[in-house]
Image: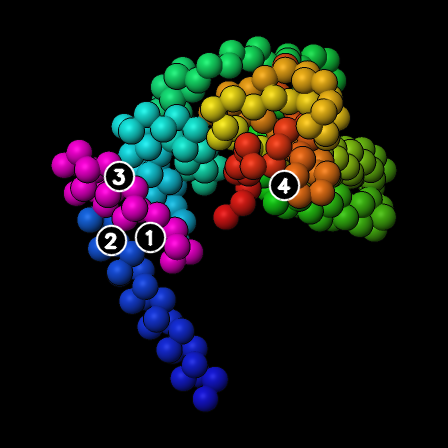
């Protein structure tokens, strides 16, 4: 019975993928005919089937861009970039869309040790750093055992030095792994969808306005207050409270 259920699920998945491929082609045809709103509706029907891909998000973003809906286009370019971070077509089109935003925010530069840690940790994913660390630990154990059982003084010295060098590499890569994990955990970006939104000093409509943001601007979510307010930070380091309804989280499916 369990095998029959698995077969049914497998066949259902194949049918769903085939249907979504057909719908995706229909969306592309509508886009090529200049029917951008219809293309959006078609592409979003695939999202409703819980199917996600960089190509789907990219085409959806292009459709919104053609309709001058900047916030939505940037949102879906960013979603595509999350799945395919080195795709130059996505990067270039995202740049075009960002050039149409009102807010010009200078990025706060990283300096010193923090810059080194962040740039190095971001070279690989957490999984890769963790696997490299395990490899170093395995070689450390092999060399340490070689040192322990070796009778030659020269071999013991070389094994001892090599084992502790490998131990140092293991600890370093483990440090980068945990740092990368922390970066990913704290990375909670969102896009402003309101045409204009006041960022408050406190989560209160009567609070003083700290600065204003406009549609399409990317922010980092820091914390929430009830369901109404979200504390955000922008690229230059400024932070404040914005209405939840004014932004859309990128990490949400």
Question: From the viewer's perspective, is residue 58 above or below residue 44?
Answer: above
Q: Residue sitting at 69 percent across and 28 percent down?
A: 205
Disc 1 to disc 4, C-alpha distance: 33 Å
Residue placed under numbered mark 4 in the picture:
126
- Which class describes the residues within 10 Å of circle 4: few (<14), some (14-19), or many (20+)? many
Residue 75 within the magenta-colored segment of the rendering: no
- 199 left or right of 44 in image: right
- Please identify the dominant SS of the magenta region: helix
Residue placed under numbered mark 1 in the picture:
45
Quadrant into which the N terminus falls:
bottom left
Disc 3 to disc 2, C-alpha distance: 15 Å
Residue placed under numbered mark 3 in the picture:
37
Q: Residue sitting at 72 percent across and 13 percent down?
A: 112
Residue placed under numbered mark 2 in the picture:
23
- The residues colored magenta run 27-50
Q: Earlier in the sequence, mark 3 or mark 2?
A: 2
Can residue 41 be spotted in the picture?
yes
Q: Earlier in the sequence, mark 2 or mark 1?
A: 2
Report x, y in % for residue 19. Answer: 26, 60
């Amino acid at each position: 019975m369990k095998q029959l259920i698995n077969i049914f699920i497998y066949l259902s998945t194949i049918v769903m993928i085939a249907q979504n491929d057909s719908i995706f082609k229909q969306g592309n045809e509508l886009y090529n005919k200049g029917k951008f709103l219809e293309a959006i509706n078609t592409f979003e029907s695939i999202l409703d089937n819980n199917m996600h891909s960089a190509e789907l998000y990219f085409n959806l973003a292009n459709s919104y861009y053609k309709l001058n809906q900047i916030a939505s286009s940037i949102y879906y370019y960013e979603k595509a970039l999350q799945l395919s971070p080195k795709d130059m077509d996505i990067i270039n089109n995202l740049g075009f869309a960002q050039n149409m935003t009102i807010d010009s925010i200078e990025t706060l530069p990283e300096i010193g040790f923090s810059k080194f840690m962040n740039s190095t940790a971001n070279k690989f994913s957490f999984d890769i750093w963790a696997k490299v660390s395990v490899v170093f630990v395995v070689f450390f154990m092999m060399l340490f055992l070689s040192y322990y059982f070796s009778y030659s003084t020269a071999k013991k010295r070389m094994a001892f030095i090599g084992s502790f060098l490998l131990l140092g590499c293991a600890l370093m890569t483990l440090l980068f792994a945990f740092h990368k994990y922390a970066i990913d955990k704290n990375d909670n970006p969102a896009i402003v969808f309101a045409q204009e939104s006041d960022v408050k000093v406190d989560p209160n409509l009567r609070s003083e306005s700290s600065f204003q943001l406009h549609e399409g601007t990317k922010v980092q979510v820091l914390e929430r207050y009830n369901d109404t307010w979200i504390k955000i930070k922008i690229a230059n380091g400024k932070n404040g409270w914005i209405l939840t309804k004014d932004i859309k989280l990128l990490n949400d499916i």
